[in-house]
Image (cartoon, rainbow, N blue to C red):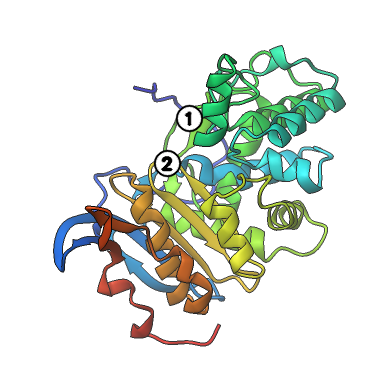
Amino acid sequence: MNPVLTYVGPLAVEAPVIREPLHAPVAHLVRGGVIEGIHYGSVVVLAADGSVELQIGDIEAAFYPRSALKPLQAVAMLRAGLPLDGELLALAAASHSGEERHLAGTRRILEVAGLPEERLRNIPDLPFDPVVRETWVRDGRPPSRLAQNCSGKHAAMLYTARLNGWSLDDYLDPAHPLQRAVAATVEELTGQAVAQVTVDGCGAPLFSVSLHGLARALAWIATAAPGTPEARVADAMREHAEMASGSGRDVSALMRAVPGLLAKDGFEGVQVAALPDGRAVAVKIADGADRARVPVAAAALARAGVDPAALAEFAGAPLLGGGAVVGHVRPTRSLDPLARPRAA
């Protein structure tokens, strides 16, 4: 288990409560007309004015956004002077697939920073994309810090630390000036104090907020005034969706399908997305299942007013029996966009 660390930083408002989340059914696994399984989770849909339009489950309990926190981390680095834009900024906010362009982009960030790959402190790993990973293994290439899906973020963190004259070897320490700046930005954008700090899979500090707070934060980023750090992150991720994720990834396809949408996924069934007018959704699937994350997020976006036709390809992968389609993963009726139809 990751150790739980103590964070001592500037408090915003009250932190979300650490408790067993009161999740609710959000998706059914239907096979042959029978509900074979149920995915529990929590969902929040925010209106353009920030009010809660829909909530299912527990949107106020403390949880870990995992990589869905990366846009907020990127905002913090820009505020601290990181001079990246475009595809390299998208990579700094990415959970990338390990494609050659992602590795090349990470090398470029390190080169501009004047730092070697050896200064990275993320864990060595194989590429995230299964096809890229298979080729990597077939070619006899070992796990690499560059290939690990958070390498762009780590390279940007090193660059930010160097620009500010901060120490490099301990840039992942929660007490480091960089991570304290990230925590302060997370608290400002979510509107709540960090409830707990632990270590993410890549080794970076991971800040616990609520699902509601995460949705608020992405809405802030998606609606920010041009030229601000928030808008720069949103523009970079929207314009370079494949750099912020990868070829064939559902999160990049979602941003391409819905004009102006800013979206970020995270391990353990987390998805957050926001539109330029401030409408936003956030999803946490209790068991971490991606097969539920995507259709539930699409249904939540439809409830937020996105045209369901634009979301048709995200309705969920079919279930096969003997090679034939015999079922599907279906969001529960509580997410039915017809419950409250509204024009996009």
Labels in figure, total:
2
* Disc 1 + disc 2, Cβ < 8 Å: yes
Which corner quadrant holds the N terminus?
top left
First in sequence: mark 1 vs mark 2: 2
Q: Is residue 296 left or right of residue 254?
A: left
Which label number is shown at residue 170?
A: none
Identify which residue is drawn at 53% across, 28% down: 133
Q: Name the mark on residue 64.
A: 2
The residue indicated by pointer 1 is 200
What residue sits 22% from the left and 52% below the top?
Answer: 322
Q: Position of residue 295 (x, y in %)?
A: 39, 62
Mark 1 neighbour class, 10 Å CA radius: few under 14, some 14 to 19, many 20 or more: some
Q: Amino acid at mark 2?
A: Tyr
Q: Position of residue 336 (x, y in %)?
A: 33, 77
| Residue 300 x %, y % | 42, 68
Q: Amino acid at mark 1?
A: Asp
Q: CA distance from mark 1 to mark 2?
A: 9 Å
Left or right of residue 291, residue 308 in this image: right
* Nearer to us in this view, 75 or 38: 38
Q: Is residue 126 visible?
A: yes
Query: Would you identify the image quadrant in which residue 147 lies?
Result: top right
